[in-house]
Amino acid sequence: MSSLAANQGESPQQPQPRALRLGLPYGAVMATGGAGQLAGACGLPGAARPLLWLAVAEAGWIAGRGLVRHRGELRLPPSAWARIGLPAEHTGVLTVPLGLAVVATGLSTQPGLAKVLGAAFVVLAWLSAAVFVARFAVSVTRRDGTTAVDGGWFLAPAALLGAGIAAAAYAGQTVGVLADLLRWVALVAAAVGVAGYWAVAAGAALAVARRGLGQGRRVLWWIAAGCGGLAAAAVGRVLAAGRALVPSGVAAAGHVVAGATWSVAAVLAVPIVVASVRSLARTRRIVRAAPWPPTFSTAVFALGALATAKMLGVPAVTGVGKVAAGATLALWAVTAVLHASRLFPAARRRPGPAETTDRDAPTVAPSPLVPDTAPMAAPPR
């Protein structure tokens, strides 16, 4: 990280809060929660609740383990935590509000204390999204960050979209002023999130056209497709929750925008999947630990497909959503097994030269919580 700071004219000795430079701490939470929401679409409704509570357990375990491992950094002065670093320092932590929102949405369907826990997760999701998205936006505008755009940038609008879905999920379970407030908050979050998706997509397209895919962690480009699906799912959910607040013409336009956004995501998914499969077929190995972005991105892509099919009445898109849902559960199972295998001593070894190259090196410090910074399948040049 010091070399990156030096390239940007910064002092590498300047104290920085490493907690803001994790890989993707809540990647596993997002993947597990998303898989749980799709279990019913795959004909496995009995798996929905266990996956949901596994996601809750992951959220608590990762947070607790992170506090223990970074307890020394909690004593950093406020100036270190207030410092706005490079965009690469801020993208990974955006998985925290998104993961909390995914879990909160799942808990909204549960009875009793589970629903109360979900409401607390909604509050935490919104508070963390407000802080982390704002920091990321300031970093991009102040640090000439557009030159380093990668797929991780899509986590910024995704955090807002996830928070909007969670708010909409609880809007129908409240009454009066609170219900209307949640609906308006969800509508605004969805609108800003969709606009943010298109803005990041435009910036990413320009960056890739100029420099190719060699400038960042390529597995993060899965999020480009996943966030488009999440945008479509968010529009469908918040418009359904706020139908009394939105004129029919605006709602119809929202459905068209959601369909167009999901279509862009579908187009982006093709080269991402093809390049990843080609790379895995060529190398027959996964670099370092199996990453979670393919799983949670496929999950929200599937949710977006199902929402788009419902909004626009296109049965073929429903089929795509069900296929993506099945792929999500398969990816989750494979990734979970590969992560679990690392718990055994025989599986703990340093990657050899054939497994790690300069091109595949992460641009931020590896996460001590979920080792999710290395690409699973880097497409060939």
Image (spheres, helix red, strand yellow):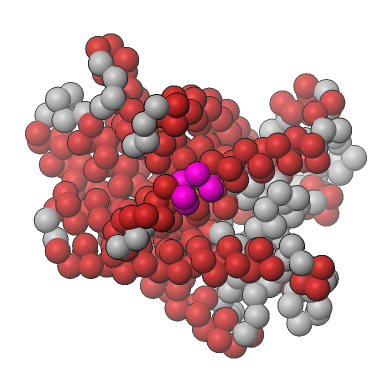
Which residue is located at x 81 percent, y 78 percent?
Answer: 352
Which residue is located at x 32 percent, y 42 percent?
Answer: 234
In the image, 282: left or right of 122? right
Q: Quadrant of residue 91?
A: top right
Which quadrant does the C terminus fall into? Answer: bottom right
Which residue is located at x 45 percent, y 78 percent?
Answer: 274
Marks counted in the figure total 0
Residue 85 in percent (x, y) is at 71, 38
Residue 380 in percent (x, y) is at 58, 80
**Magenta-span inclusion, residue 52:** yes
**Magenta-span inclusion, residue 21:** no
In the image, 120: left or right of 256? right
In the image, 61: left or right of 72? left
In the image, 92: left or right of 351? left
- Residue nearest the viewer, comparing 49 with 286: 49
Is the stretch drawn in magenta largely helix, strand or loop?
Answer: helix
Magenta span: 50-55
- Residue nearest the viewer, comparing 243 with 174: 174
Which residue is located at x 20 percent, y 41 percent?
Answer: 254
